[in-house]
């Protein structure tokens, strides 16, 4: 079953990806499946930055409908039609 999921990102990650928002139809059922599908539609450098060696980069935060996926099931978090997945690079400073 295909799901329509909205991808969002901001700042330099949006510059790297080449888009800020994108609706993606995905066959898989997890956040990882979704991200792999997104990588087919954006600049390849974005995918290498987000999932180096197939593991989520330590310097990005992924949210499903506003909730950090690390508070759920990480990359194995289930996705549903209509979800919004946001990929962010938290700002550090003061």
Image (spheres, grey):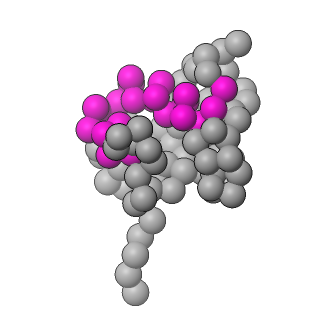
Q: Is residue 19 visible?
A: yes
Quarter of the rendering occupied by the N terminus = top right
Residue situated in front as seen by the camera: 46 or 14: 46
The answer to whether 77 appears left or right of 87 in the picture is: right
Q: Residue 18, percent across and down?
A: 32, 37
Q: Residue at x 71, y 51 (%)?
A: 72
The region drawn magenta spans 29-50
The answer to whether 3 appears left or right of 32 in the picture is: right
Quarter of the rendering occupied by the C terminus = bottom left
Q: Residue 92, percent across and down?
A: 40, 75
What secondary structure is the stretch in magenta mostly built from?
helix
- Residue 48 colored in magenta in the image: yes
Residue situated in front as seen by the camera: 20 or 43: 43
Q: Is residue 83 visible?
A: no
Q: Residue at x 67, y 21 (%)?
A: 3
Give the total number of marks visible in the rendering. Answer: 0
Q: Which residue is drawn at 29% across and 32% down?
A: 43
Q: Which image quarter: residue 25?
A: top right
Q: Residue 90, percent across and down?
A: 45, 65
Q: Which residue is drawn at 72% across and 27% down?
A: 81
- Residue 34 colored in magenta in the image: yes
List the single residue furthest toward the bottom: 94
Residue situated in front as seen by the camera: 84 or 78: 78
Q: In this view, does 59 lie above or below 30?
A: below
Q: Residue 84, percent across and down?
A: 63, 40
The answer to whether 33 appears left or right of 2 in the picture is: left
Q: Is residue 22 above or below residue 15?
A: above
């Amino acid at each position: 079953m295909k799901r329509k999921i909205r991808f969002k990102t901001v700042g330099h990650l949006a510059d790297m990806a080449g888009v800020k928002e994108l609706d993606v139809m995905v066959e898989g059922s997890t956040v990882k499946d979704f991200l792999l599908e997104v990588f087919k539609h954006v600049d390849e450098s974005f995918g290498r930055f987000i999932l180096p060696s197939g593991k989520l980069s330590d310097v990005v935060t992924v949210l499903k409908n506003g909730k950090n996926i690390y508070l759920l099931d990480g990359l194995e978090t289930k996705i549903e039609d209509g979800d919004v997945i946001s990929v962010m690079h938290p700002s550090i400073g003061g």
